[in-house]
């Protein structure tokens, strides 16, 4: 089924398979034209020497190793471990009209009609047997809320499955069927996967039965945020065709190892357009182990809000390269505060691993158990610094603790000023209205759409609390701090937007 959840104002990345969630994802896709099979003159005209040179170089460029003419042996090896997962649950329906999305994605169950009363929703997804005694990996959205789950094997058997545990933040679930000596797919080290690696997607799309498609790893470290602010996403992107029903199925390498669990597709219609996402096997292994051993997943927590370093922020911070994440705020009595991490620090590495995005930092911290000690390399005032933090624990119902910057505020006021900002004092009443965590600063009463502040992303209702690490108390301190910004560098402005802090680079107006 398609999952309509969207990150802030970004287009949705629908789920690749059926489950007990419903909705329609909207996305405007561009159309690409692919030309192929053109004759030599179309490229070279009558330039025979050039044509001969390319023809001569062709074998040297192409004959770099054996060419696979069939994946049949690999498919025969892995296909018995990829199962169809059928889930169902009873819900109270007051209407079941033809336009009801439940009908579109689950079909009408036996005995369903237009009458009010309990209805049985049915979903179809896929799963991967990973242990000989019957543990199966699938997606949380395939079985979420289900009261009955059945697994169909390739040998024709249908087995009742027990849901061992689910983890909505990673969209993973573990099932268990009774039996022994099941065919399995071993888990690969997904950290070693490279962009360009050939992969096969195996699953049960659209109720057709087991289907195999082929493609490559198109990208790594993707985050669609379709799972919402609390989601943990570190997707492998692939162009191997996957569709609804592939969710929970296998993405395997040419050694027959599981590199990912297929989870989402990006599509305007819910069908394949060559952009699919799989949960890396390393993340799946960590989650599966905790669900089997403990029944739930515990994640480490630093206790800070971080945002990615952009080119403009790098200029504001006078960084030599665009890398790391900027600490927008540090929670009180958190692991980050106890370690001495400060607002305005740039985190470059965690335990020797380069950090390039707030999502990357969050995933690396979330994979560690509470109480784990980590070493972070920081950049503070142009100097590198190393600190050690003992991780806290992410609360079960926590929203994103390392969000990618502030959220929008809707408020209509007049605009003006040299930077395109109109400033009002911050009163306790206004702070409460804006749900601000700060009680000092100035309020952006309006933003000129043609000004530099609007281009930088400022919005009415933002509270400016600091400029270049200088605290702002009124309009005069704001003007003075902006005027002191070195020429050629944007001012580094810290705001509070509905209780979420974030940094914005503000260019000096021309003229």
Image (cartoon, grey):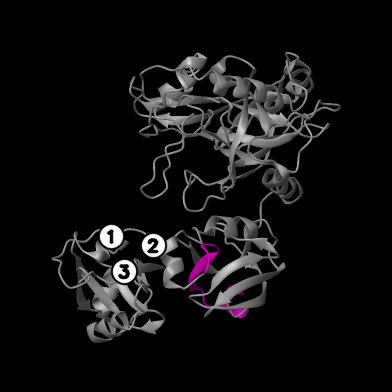
User: On the image, which quarter does residue 458 sit in?
Assistant: bottom left
Counting every numbered tag in the picture gives: 3
Tags 1 and 3 in contact by the CB under 8 Å rule?
yes
The numbered mark at residue 472 is none
The numbered mark at residue 406 is 2
Marks 1/3: CA–CA distance: 9 Å
Earlier along the polypeptide chain: callout 2 or callout 3? 2
Left or right, 334 with reference to 417: right
Magenta segment boundaries in residue numbering: 320-338
Marks 2/1: CA–CA distance: 16 Å
Marks 2/3: CA–CA distance: 19 Å
Earlier along the polypeptide chain: callout 2 or callout 1? 2
- Helix, strand, or loop for circle 3? loop
The numbered mark at residue 455 is 1
Local packing at callout 1 (Cα closer than 10 Å; few below 14, some 14-19, many 20+) is some
- Helix, strand, or loop for circle 2? loop
């Amino acid at each position: 089924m398609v999952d309509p959840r969207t990150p802030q104002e970004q287009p949705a990345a629908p789920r690749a398979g059926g489950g007990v969630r419903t909705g329609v994802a909207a996305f405007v896709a561009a159309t690409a034209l692919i030309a192929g099979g053109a004759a030599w003159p179309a490229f070279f005209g009558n330039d025979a020497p050039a044509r001969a040179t390319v023809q001569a170089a062709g074998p040297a460029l192409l004959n770099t190793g054996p060419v696979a003419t069939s994946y049949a042996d690999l498919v025969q090896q892995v296909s018995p471990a990829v199962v169809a997962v059928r889930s169902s649950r009873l819900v109270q329906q007051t209407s079941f009209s033809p336009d009801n999305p439940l009908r579109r994605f689950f079909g009408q169950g036996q005995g369903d009609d237009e009458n009010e009363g309990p209805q049985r929703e049915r979903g179809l997804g896929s799963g991967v047997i990973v242990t000989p005694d019957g543990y199966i990996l699938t997606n949380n959205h395939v079985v979420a809320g289900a009261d009955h789950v059945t697994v169909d094997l390739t040998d024709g058997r249908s087995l009742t499955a027990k849901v061992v545990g689910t983890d909505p933040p990673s969209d993973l679930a573990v099932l268990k069927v009774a039996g022994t000596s099941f065919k399995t797919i071993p888990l690969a080290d997904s950290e070693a996967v490279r962009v360009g690696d050939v992969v096969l997607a195996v699953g049960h799309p659209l109720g057709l039965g087991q289907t195999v498609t082929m493609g490559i790893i198109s990208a790594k470290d993707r985050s669609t945020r379709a799972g919402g602010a609390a989601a943990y996403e570190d997707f492998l992107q692939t162009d191997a065709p996957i569709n609804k029903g592939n969710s929970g199925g296998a993405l395997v390498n040419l050694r027959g190892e599981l590199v990912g669990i297929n989870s989402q597709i990006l599509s305007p219609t819910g069908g394949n357009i060559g952009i699919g996402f799989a949960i890396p096997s390393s993340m799946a292994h960590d989650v599966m182990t905790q669900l089997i051993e403990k029944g739930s997943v515990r994640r480490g927590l630093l206790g800070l809000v971080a945002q990615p370093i952009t080119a403009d922020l790098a200029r504001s911070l006078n960084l030599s390269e665009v890398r790391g994440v900027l600490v927008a705020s540090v929670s009180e009595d958190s692991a980050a505060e106890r370690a001495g991490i400060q607002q305005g620090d740039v985190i470059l590495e965690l335990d020797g691993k380069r950090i390039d995005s707030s999502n990357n930092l969050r995933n690396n911290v979330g994979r560690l158990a509470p109480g784990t000690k980590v070493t972070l390399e920081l950049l503070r005032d142009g100097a590198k610094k190393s600190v050690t933090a003992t991780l806290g624990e992410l609360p079960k119902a926590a929203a994103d603790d390392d969000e990618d910057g502030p959220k929008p505020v809707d408020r209509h006021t007049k605009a003006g000023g040299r930077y395109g900002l109109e400033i009002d004092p911050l009163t306790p009443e206004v702070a409460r209205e804006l749900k601000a965590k700060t009680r000092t600063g100035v309020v952006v009463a309006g933003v000129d759409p043609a000004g530099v502040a609007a281009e930088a992303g400022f919005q009415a209702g933002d509270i400016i609390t600091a400029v270049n690490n200088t605290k702002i108390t009124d309009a005069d301190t704001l003007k003075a701090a902006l005027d002191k910004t070195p020429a050629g560098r944007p001012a580094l402005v810290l705001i509070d937007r509905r209780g979420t802090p974030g940094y914005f680079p503000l260019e000096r107006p021309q003229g």
